[in-house]
Image (cartoon, rainbow, N blue to C red):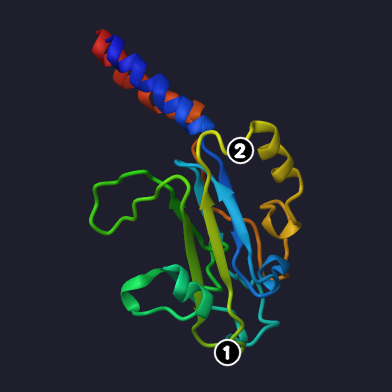
Amino acid sequence: MEFLWASLLGLCCSLAAADRHTVFWNSSNPKFWNEDYTIHVRLDDYLDIICPHYEDDSVADAAMEQYTLYLVEREQYQLCQPPSKDHVRWFCNNPKAKHGPEKLSEKFHRFTGFTLSKDFKEGHSYYYISKPMHHQEDRCLKLKVFIDGKITRSPQAHANAQEKRLPADDPEVQVLHSIGHSAAPRLFPLAWAVLLLPLLLLQIL
């Protein structure tokens, strides 16, 4: 019984501690205009990619931004050239989705045990790039993610970094007219506790 309560408490604490880092993946995001767009995360944090989305017909289908995103090595990141289709991470290919903009998420696990998953390490950088699918503009959108160690970033420094984010990285701000809020639901620690409570009651009874 004590083990179940400890597991529930551990799950809630880990969910509460994890941060979500939102990036609007479109050419109007000014962060992509820099050559070294970097975000700092910690293990068990999430990266949420918000794909381009168009709610009306003001943009022709051929001009709607759609991307193939890749997780690559540093050399391919610098050249903005994926080596093969094996490095495809996601597709942003539904710009008129009825449910709203697609959200693609990466959790930075230390070890997953799954063949198709990526293992991430503290103190290392990871690189994402994209290639447009249909529209003519070939601007290279690329992102570097650095995984901080436990002592490489203080809570105050992290708070300051969150305050200084540009609106392009704020999920409450629309950067592009074609970008809206994600309709994907998110479970908070309290919700997890409510879902697991019946299991604990069964153990007691």
The residue at which mark 2 appears reads as 153
The amino acid type found where label 2 is placed reads Arg
Mark 1 neighbour class, 10 Å CA radius: few under 14, some 14 to 19, many 20 or more? few
Q: Position of residue 158 (x, y in %)?
A: 66, 39
Question: In the image, is 111 to the left or to the right of 170?
Answer: left
The amino acid type found where label 1 is placed reads Ala
Q: Position of residue 86 (x, y in %)?
A: 31, 73
- Relative to the observer, which residue lies in front, 161 or 154? 154
In this view, 141 is above or below 45: below
- Relative to the observer, which residue lies in front, 73 or 104? 73
Question: Which mark is in front, 2 or 1?
Answer: 2
Q: Quadrant of residue 90?
A: bottom left
The residue shown at (60%, 54%) is: 39
The residue shown at (63%, 71%) is: 26
The residue shown at (34%, 78%) is: 85
The residue at which mark 1 appears reads as 62
- Relative to the observer, which residue lies in front, 118 or 98? 118
Q: CA gap, disc 2 to disc 1?
A: 44 Å
The residue shown at (63%, 64%) is: 37
Q: Position of residue 202 (x, y in %)?
A: 26, 15
Q: Quadrant of the C terminus?
A: top left
